[in-house]
Image: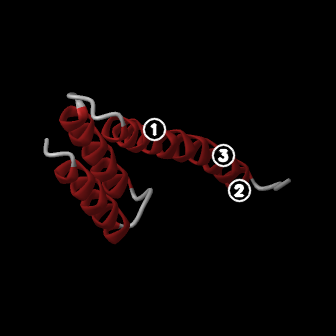
Amino acid sequence: MPNIKSAIKRVKINEYKNEQNAAFKSAMRTAVKKFETAVAQNDENAKDLFKNAVKQLDKAVTKGIIHKNTANRQKARLAKKLSAIGA
């Protein structure tokens, strides 16, 4: 455990940021999985879930949670699944 006041604060902030990033990443993954489940079941709300998943991926890029190319690759794969069901 650090002794210096600024180092103690940095540890606290790192723990907080780690929790926030993990929660955000989990929400992003959940949105993607909900879309993939809807596509597998041919739900009519797949298009709305696709928009939500893309929004979550874009937010993750903005916040620095995932890399830009990773998000673009995932969005392309999701769009391909959406077009496969003809929505």
Q: Position of residue 20 (x, y in %)?
A: 53, 41
- On screen, 5 above or below 33? below
* Residue on which the image places disc 3: 15
Q: Position of residue 55 (x, y in %)?
A: 25, 44
| Residue located at (39% from left, 35% from top) | 34
SS at badge 2: helix
**Side of 19 relative to 8 (left or right):** left
- Closer to viewer: mark 2 or mark 3: 3
| Residue located at (62% from left, 51% from top) | 14
Pointer 2 or 3: first along the chain? 2
Quarter location, residue 68: bottom left
What residue type is disc 2 on?
A: Ala
- Closer to viewer: mark 1 or mark 2: 1
What residue type is disc 3 on?
A: Glu
- Closer to viewer: mark 1 or mark 3: 1
Quarter location, residue 41: top left
Q: Position of residue 64 (x, y in %)?
A: 40, 59
SS at badge 1: helix
SS at badge 3: helix
| Residue located at (26% from left, 48% from top) | 54
Marks 1 and 3, Cα distance to the nearest angstrom?
A: 23 Å
**Side of 50 relative to 86 (left or right):** right
Pointer 1 or 2: first along the chain? 2
Marks 1 and 2, Cα distance to the nearest angstrom?
A: 34 Å
What residue type is disc 1 on?
A: Thr
The residue nearer to you, when weighing 7 against 42, is: 42
Q: Which mark is residue 7?
A: 2
Marks 2 and 3, Cα distance to the nearest angstrom?
A: 12 Å
The residue nearer to you, when weighing 53 against 33, is: 33
* Residue on which the image places disc 1: 30
Q: Residues within 10 Å of mark 1 (few under 14, many from 20)?
A: some
